[in-house]
Structures are given as structure tokens and as C-alpha cells.
Amino acid sequence: MPIMESPLIYRIKERLAALNLTAAEAARSANLGESFVRDILRGKTKSPSAANIAKLAAVLQTTPESLLVGHGPSAETTLRNALIAFGVDRDELDQVLRVIKTYVHDEPDVDDERSEQTSSEDQPLPATRHREPTP
């Protein structure tokens, strides 16, 4: 399995889990080869056809668009994958994530709070700062 899952792989796995289906069960229900679906989930099939995505989406009770364009992995999942890719030991991963979470939080800045109190409809809101978590 690739270290960094593609959004398609993530969404298929998410739907399989939500429906309590195995990849083999989904493949049979979609009239697709089990090895084909396993290859998708392993990242070995880069671009399955639209027809096959539609078959799989129907079995997964979703739309092809949601498999291809829906929400991807959470920020924490992405960070976990990045930390593993950079060599963080899997046994220490949760501890590293706890340390990172203590330094990265979503508290509003004092300037943002003041601007919310004084803003009116004819004044544009200030741009919010976006902090990227760094490993």
C-alpha cells in the first residue's frame, strides 16, 4: 500500500468501512474483478475507467463524483502519513502528534477578536491567518 493514499483510495476505503464491506464483496457486487479493486486500493491502478468507477460507486451507495472529488483524508491523517514518510517510528507516532497538537491550535488572534467587534457591513473583514502544521 502506498504511504500517501490518493483521495480516491481514501474515499473507497471510507465507504467500504461505512458499509461494512470488504473489497472482494464490493468487487463481486459491482461485477468487477477482485484483483482490479485490490489494485485500485493499493494504488497500482492509476486511472480506472469512468464506467468502472460508476459501478463501484453504485455498490458503495455514492456517486462517482463523490469518489473522485469528495473530501479527502483529514489533516491528521495527512500529517500521520507525512511523519511516517519522513521516518518517524510508528511506535512514537501518537506521542509526536500530541506534541505537535500542543503547539498548533486554533485560538483566535487578539487582532481578529478586535476586528470582529468593530466590523460593520461596509468594512471588509481582515484576512485570517492560515497556519500549516509542520513536522
Image (cartoon, rainbow, N blue to C red):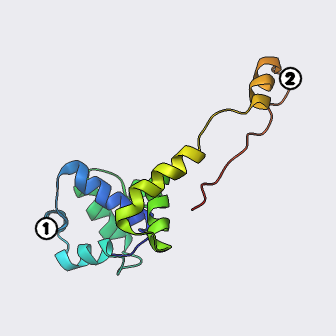
Query: Which quadrant of the figure contains the C terminus?
Result: bottom right
Please indicate whether residue 117 sits to the left or right of residue 50 in the image. Answer: right
Q: Which residue is drawn at 46% across and 49% down?
A: 98
Q: Which residue is drawn at 13% across and 67% down?
A: 28
Q: Which residue is drawn at 80% across and 35% down?
A: 126
Q: What element carries label 1?
A: helix
Q: Which image quadrant for residue 7?
A: bottom left
Q: Residue 72: in sight, yes or no?
A: no
Q: The disc labelled 2 sits on which kind of residue?
A: Asp
Task: Please tell me whether residue 107 is drawn above or below residue 62 in the rendered image.
Answer: above
Q: Residue 77: in sight, yes or no?
A: yes
Residue 95 or residue 122, whichever sits in front: 95
Residue 103 or residue 131, whichever sits in front: 103
Residue lying at the far right of the rendered structure: 122
| The label number, if any, that marks residue 122 in the structure image | 2
- The Cα–Cα distance between marks 2 and 1, rounded to whole angstroms, is 58 Å
Q: Do the residues labelled 2 and 1 touch (CB within 8 Å)?
A: no
Task: Please tell me whether residue 39 is drawn above or below residue 6 in the rendered image.
Answer: below
Q: The disc labelled 1 sits on which kind of residue?
A: Arg
Locate residue 25, reporting x and y percent: 13, 63
Q: What element carries label 2?
A: loop
The residue carrying mark 1 is 28
Circle 1 packing at 10 Å, graded few (<14), some (14-19), many (20+), is some
Q: Earlier in the sequence, mark 2 or mark 1?
A: 1
